[in-house]
Structures are given as C-alpha cells and as structure tokens.
Amino acid sequence: MENFKIDVDADGIATITFDVPGRSMNTLTGKVMAEIPEWVEQVKSDDAIKGVVLTSGKASGFCAGADLGDMAAGMLGGADLQAAFDAGWRLNGALRALETCGKPVVAAINGLALGGGLELTLACHYRVAGDSSKIQLGLPEIKVGLFPGGGGTQRLTRLIGVQAAMTAMTAGSSWRPNDAKNAGVVHEVVPAGTEVEAAKAWIKGGGKASQPWDVKGFKIPGGGPYHPAGIQNFLVGNAMIRKQTYANYPAALNLMKAVYEGLQVPMDAALRIETRYFIKTLMTPEAQAMIRSLFLSKQELDKGAARPADVPPSDPKKVAVLGAGMMGAGIAYVQAMAGIETILIDRDQESADKGKGYAEDIIKKRVSRGQMTQDKADAVLALITPTSDYSLIKGSDLVIEAVFENRELKATVTQMAEAQLEPGAVFGSNTSTLPISGLAEASSRPEDFIGIHFFSPVDKMMLVEIIMGEKTGPAALAKALDYVMKIKKTPIVVEDGRGFYTSRCFGTYVAEGMAMLEEGISPVLIDNIGRATGMPRGPLEMHDDVALDLSVKIAKQTAEDLGDAYRPLPGSDIVRKMVEDLGRYGRKNGKGFYDYDSKPKVIWSGLAELAPVKVDELSMDEVADQKRRLLYRQAVEVARCWDEGVIDDPREADVGAILAWGFAPWTGGPITMIDQTGLKAFVEQADIYAARYGDRFAVPQFLRDMAAKGETFYGKFAAQKAAA
Ligand code: NAI
C-alpha cells in the first residue's frame, strides 16, 4: 500500500498510519479509497491482530476529506449512473466493512478531520482527539454544493441525534476537540501527542468491536422519523431548510431525504440510500458549478493563478498601513496574524492606538475562547507599531493606503510615504471608488502603484480585488499577489475603471431593486425576491447596509466626472429625498428603507408616499421572472466588464462575484450561470428584458457572436489554456 503503513505491536495492536506520499495533507483520493478495503481485509483475516488504531502521519492534520479534484475529474458530467453509484459506494462499502470487521478500531485524531476525514473516524468504534487549537472536526460538504457521502448522514444522526447532526451538516460547521466531546462526536480528548497511547489503552481496557447502531435494541437519540419527538425534527427541519435555501440547493434537500429515509432502515441499506442521493446531488448543475468555483477555481487563485510567472517570488516582511480607521485597523490585524511586521499610521498617536485596539480586542476574544495561546497573542500584537511618524515606513516592502476617500489627501500621503520607500517597494491604495490611474498621478513611481481593494469587515471577507492602473508594472502586481497570498486571502486581478469589477457589478443589483421600487413593486416583495434568488440579502436591505448618503455622494461625484454622459440610476430621486429631506441614511442611523428601532426591522411606513405600491402580489411565474431579472442584470454587467477588458478570467469573475458581493453561490457565479443557461438562451432572455426594462439589459456584441458560434466562456478558456 502506498498511503497506509501498518505496525503491529507486541500486544497485537495494529497502528495504521494514514500518510499520502508527496502531499502535506491527507485526502481521500481514488487510490486511498481503493487501499482501505485492503487493510480492512488484512485486519480481519490476521489472527495476530487484536485491535486497530488509525492515525495520521501528517503534522498538518488527520484528513481533509475527499479529493474534490479527483471527484470532479472522475464524475462531473458522467452520465453512467451505475458506474457513478459504484464509485460513490467505494468509500461507504469500505467503511462499513471496517466497522463490522470484528475487531475494535479506534481513531486517534491528531489533526483536523473534515468531511470524508471525519466520516472515516465515525466508522471507528471509538474516537480520541488531541487537545489542540489546530484541530477542527466537521462535515463542510454543503459549502461546495454536496453533503456527506461517506456515511456521515447516517452515523452522525445515529450518534448525536437528528437535530444536532442536521444543524451541523446544513451549516457545514465544525467543532474544536472539547466541543466535539461535549456534542458526543468524540469520546475522549487527551493532551496532543498522546492520542495513539490513549487509543491503545482503550483497546487494552476491553473496548468493544461494535457500533451502537449494530446492537440490538438501538434507539436513535431524540427519536427517529416514527417517534413523536423525532418527527418534529423533520417537520421543522423541512421548513427551516426551505427558509434558509429557498430550494436553491439540491444538496440541502437531498441531505434531508437521505437522513429521513436512511434512519428507517438498518445501516447497510441506509448507506446505499445515502450513496444514491449523494450521486444524484453530485450530478446536479448546482453541485458542479459550486465545486468548480468555490473549490477548484478558488484554490487555483489562492495559489497565484493570476500571478506573472516570470517575476521571482517575494515575501513581504514589513508592511505599512496608512489610516488606522475601520479598514486600516482590520488590514493591520490580518497581516500581523500572518506574521508581517506592521507600521500602523494615523494623523496622531491616539488615532493610531485606537486602530491597534481593534486587533487587541479580537485577539483577546480568541484567547478567551481557547483559539489562540497567550504567547501567540503577545507575539502578534508585538508586530503592530501604531504611530504618526511616517519615517517608520522606512524598510517596508509595501504600503497600503486606507485614509479617507479623498483624492487630495490620498495624493499627500502617497508622496509622504514614497519619500521613505526604497526602489521596488509597492504602494497599494485601498480606495473603493477612485480610479487607480488617477490616484497614481500623485506618485513618482506609477509602475509600483496599484489598487489593493479589501472588503469590510476585513478579517471575515476572504476576497481582495487587485486593480491595475494604466502604468502598473508586472513586478508590482506579483508583489501585491504575494502579499495577498501571505495573508491567506483570495485575489482577483482586474483592470481600472469606475467601480472596478466588484463594486460596479454589485451596484446593479441594488439599482435593479430601486427600479422595481419605482415600478411600484412592494418593498417587501422586492427583498423577498432578492433573497429567494440566493443573494444574501434583498437589494433594499443591502442599500441600507451600504448607506444611502454614500449612494447620493457617489451619484454626485459620478455626475460631475461624466458630464453629459451621466445617466442617473433608477430610483435616485427617491434616495435623494430620503437622504437630503428626511435624514434617512440607512442602517447606520437606524433609518433607511427600513426602520431599525424594532426587531425584526420593518419597512419604513413613509416609503409608500415616495414610492406608491402598485404590485403587492405576484404569481409564482412572475416571481421566477423577477428573480431571473435580478440575476440577469448583474450577469449582463459582468459580460460588459468582460467586453471592456476589466476582467478576462472566468474563474476570477465567478469567484470574485460570490466572495465579494454574495452573488448567488448555487449558480457558481455569473459566468457559470451564463454558460449553464447556454449563451443563446441567455441572450434571448436578456433581449426580452432590454425591450421591457431598457438598455441596461443590452448585451455586448461579443456575447451574441459567442452565442452564434455555440461557444461557452469556460470552453474557450480551457482551449486557450491548452494552447498556451
Ligand atoms: P475611516 O474613516 O474609518 O478611516 C480613515 C482613517 O484615515 C481615519 O482613522 C483617519 O484618521 C485616517 N487619516 C486621515 N488622514 C490621515 C493622514 N494624513 N495620515 C494617516 N491617516 C489619516 O475610513 P475607512 O472606512 O477605513 O476607509 C478607508 C479607505 O478604505 C477609503 O479609501 C475607503 O473608500 C476604502 N474602503 C472602505 C470600505 C468600507 O467598507 N468602509 C471598503 C473598501 C475600501
């Protein structure tokens, strides 16, 4: 065997060490799944073996789960159902053989165990986890459009009950070792490094070779489908899944079905039910789209797919942050966490200290929750130097500017910082609206000037949008990407332009909601329709979150910049009145389209005067049409960005859309949505909307040309990559 090593000790306990060669982390590759039955058979047939301890040979973890790259390559688009079932059954069959091998098997969990990794341990009779803040246990499959297909839906529910298991599986959440013990997922937590010893002790102490569900008289904790209390979980669970997903995710519905049906039969049949639903889910366009964008493409971007290959790698060790406000403070925190020496500059010492206080607060919380040791906390905080002294910038590899959104101020601090920088150091602006090429005019070294656009809150939002100015050089791009990779965020690279890529396309979602409001559609319906598309919030709610006064400010600035070419956005009169006449700024002052005094928030009663309601009921077909309208409006803007060269890689367009503004994740992103719809059908529908709602739905000519030739974005991209 390539991936497992077996050592039998004097007591007859076989330690099986899982260690995939040449990789830093164990995953369940096809080869690994083929080898599990081999050692299970050996354990079963070798009389000298009395018990088994399964552990990992990797410092980084126990097992991160199925190899999605493998799975995607082997199964996506495959239509042979029997072959797909057999492939899906491989792991389930092997794990069932393991738990019925007749000898006690213990998982010594010495690192993170996620997805198929945790499922592997659930098929063991006993689980011991090390007490380490690095260990997480969970079933995150739902996040890529799947659900656990290695027995997790059947074993976890039988272990901890339907409600707790469904909550964990539908959220894709994970446990730290002690939480896992409290939840009943592991049996024992021991000091890190003593897992194998503790596992052996359990076997020697007479540990039994059987699972609770294989013992006669077993009852599902909290009750199964036919139990009066148990059935409640399904009644309520169905409603909750519907409410959370609007039926956009086949994985969530199929998960529920697999659990409901599986719990009514013995384990062998239950696992076959799980495999059937799993394969069915894997073959949906939603799962294929999500695996590609949220796993494969994201991973490629995380590894620097957009980086110019001919620039040698750099390692930013010292980075100065200008402006210790909301964004600067967040940036300082994430880069210190990545081990980067950070100079955090503001106008005066007090403001700079306040910025560092943000990192202090988060870190204090992490320590109190046991997620970080005090030593690590001290070391991270020691990396941040708050100051008003620009001379401390000296020696920085990179400067990130996050002062007020004001051109003159940004020009001044650019020059002050550049006076301290060595040649080759990069200056990045975190501006959200000001074109980079314009800001670069203040720079004496525009080839090293670039946009590095973070999202708020910086520690939670995983995307960074890198913006190329007209004169930005490849070295600056490479260095900016090396920095983003070092702080473990996902970069996309776009060309300069109003709103860059993400703000520009996101804006169309909000604006289309405003158009619906102007048409007289009830605000409650608009936001419900928005959420039902799979966007995280409705357009009006999002508008409130962004701030209505900001929207008015940006409209004024745009009108000034564009002159005669300026076209006001739909509903801008309504927003202007709300801001200028009525002081309604959005969520930040508790007054926007909603009133925030009460919980839950309610639509502001005065809105009906500014936007009289003409439509407060729609048929299901009309709802579907309005949902599509909201998604299409965004996708058309993405196509325009493509046309203008703002973005040119489908992976960046898709991953960026989902991570930056929450574009309905089930679609896999706007480009995947266009591809899966079919370009011809997309263009035809967009034309209908253009005729009905106006030019903002007009698609660029290149999309018609692609449609006429039967092309797809990803098809073309793959061909280009193959040719390069
Ligand atoms: P903020 O108002 O919270 O912080 C700005 C900070 O800059 C303040 O602490 C201020 O004292 C400081 N500052 C002003 N003059 C300075 C100087 N001469 N030297 C050093 N520091 C100075 O603003 P926020 O929200 O952090 O935004 C900063 C930048 O990030 C803006 O360009 C904004 O457009 C951009 N941005 C904001 C996002 C957001 O969601 N708030 C998202 C992405 C980008």
Image (tube, rainbow, N blue to C red):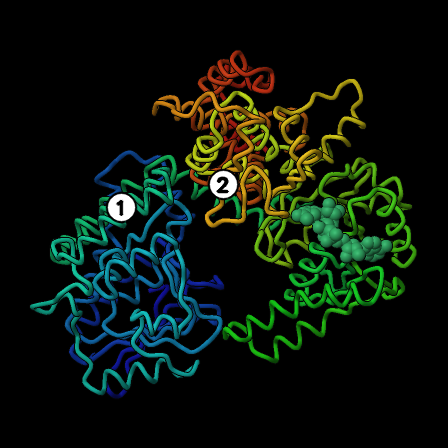
Q: How many marks?
A: 2
Q: CA distance from mark 1 to mark 2?
A: 21 Å
| Horizontal relation, residue 318 to residue 266: left or right | right
User: Tags 1 and 2 in contact by the CB under 8 Å rule?
Assistant: no
| Horizontal relation, residue 626 to residue 157: left or right | right
Q: Is mark 1 within 8 Å of ligand 1?
A: no
Residue kind at label 2, given as amino acid type: Arg
Name the residue located 35 percent from the left edge and 58 percent from the top edge. 168
- Identify the secondary structure beneath mark 2: loop
Quadrant of the image occupied by residue 184 = bottom left
- Identify the secondary structure beneath mark 1: helix
Above or below, 210 relative to 521: below
Neighbor class of circle 1 (other Cα within 10 Å; few <14, some 14-19, many 20+) is some
What label sits on residue 303 in the rendered view?
none
Q: Which percent across, then down, holds residue 177? A: 40, 73
Residue kind at label 1, given as amino acid type: Asn
Q: Which percent across, then down, holds residue 396? A: 81, 61
In front of the other: 318 or 462: 462
Quadrant of the image occupied by residue 558 = top right
- Which numbered disc flags the more N-terminal residue, 1 or 2? 1
Above or below, 455 relative to 266: above
Q: Which residue is mark 1?
A: 238
Q: Which residue is mark 2?
A: 537
Residue 651 visible to an observer of this rendering:
no
Above or below, 341 relative to 247: below
